[in-house]
Image (spheres, rainbow, N blue to C red):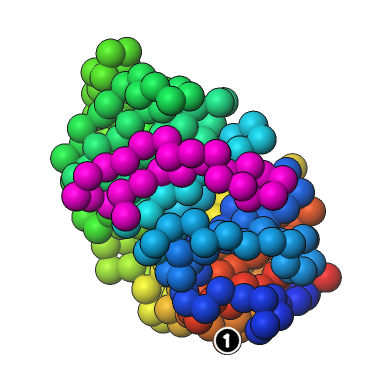
Amino acid sequence: MSFQIRTRADSADKHTADVNTLIYYKGKLYSGADDGKIMSWEEDLRKITEVKAHVTTVLCLAGSSDNLFSCSNDGNIKKWSLTDLQEQGTLFTQKDGEIYRLVATNGTLYSSDEQGVVRVHEGDVIKNIFNLLEPLREVIVLGNFLYTVRDLDLVITEMKDNGNFQTAKSFNGRAPACLAGDYLCFSSRGGKDIIIHENNPENEFKPVAEVKDAHTMIINSLVGVKTSSGAVLYSAGWDKIIKKWKIENGACTLVGSVDSEMVVNVLTNGEKGEIYAGGSDGHIIRVDDM
């Protein structure tokens, strides 16, 4: 099977600036970019609609129930209707600061800001606040564990009630990071290597593999997919190459690659095995195994 580009967003439809965030949610792709817009797309990258969501950069999107949430360096978290991208209100405003990341899981929304504060939102109420003291480019939530990283260390935090928390483990590394099945994957501090650990607190997140010089330039995005035989990892970044890796038997093996012809800022996966990539100058592509 070949790993290749299936389609690109039409140049007349795409964002006018770099794409920073992509999510595939309930059968549609949603994108946010430096032009302050959110766009929704069919699976084949035919644009459905767009909205000027923020006055500045859209940094992250998350979907929960029938809503889409967006955050920006304008300090706002906004809520949108999935069906038509109509604004449903501002959930939270961080004065004099940026909201970097959003994660939605089990009806709860998590947000992180440039001061390293992670907030737990339930509806319009902030249920908990975890002050992790450094800006967080990547935030992953699984159960009561919080995975955070920017430039120096990936930190795994066990969240407790009433805002209490305890560091479970930390590793040298930097964003991006992702979960791929039973594995925790992230970049080295140099930005070109891929590091893989078991995602298992019982064995202290044991190291599995490290791929030296996985890319020739800094990696900007990692996406993991669980398979029947193990896990698949996708990586991309400044070298414009999207790579597919298979993780099994203590090794991470390259099984496919494609030249995206753009600096890739973000990857996300669809529900049929497809991968979407967003990057420089508003470009979005779909990559399939054919």
Image quadrant where residue 278 sits: bottom right
- At 43% across and 25% down in the image, what residue appears? 124
Please identify the residue farthest to the bottom as the structure is shown. Answer: 261
Which percent across, then down, holds residue 139? 39, 44
33 shown above or below 163? below
- At 36% across and 46% down in the image, what residue appears? 76
85 shown above or below 198? below
Regarding residue 208, the answer to whether it shows in the image is: no
Q: Nearer the viewer, residue 284 or 16?
A: 16
Task: Mark 1: give few (<14), some (14-19) or many (20+) Cα within 10 Å.
Answer: few
What are the residue bounds of the magenta stretch? 74-98
99 shown above or below 90? below
Please identify the residue farthest to the left as the structure is shown. Answer: 133
> Which residue is tagged 1?
261
Regarding residue 70, the answer to whether it shows in the image is: yes
Check residue 91 for magenta coloring.
yes
Which percent across, then down, holds residue 55? 39, 62
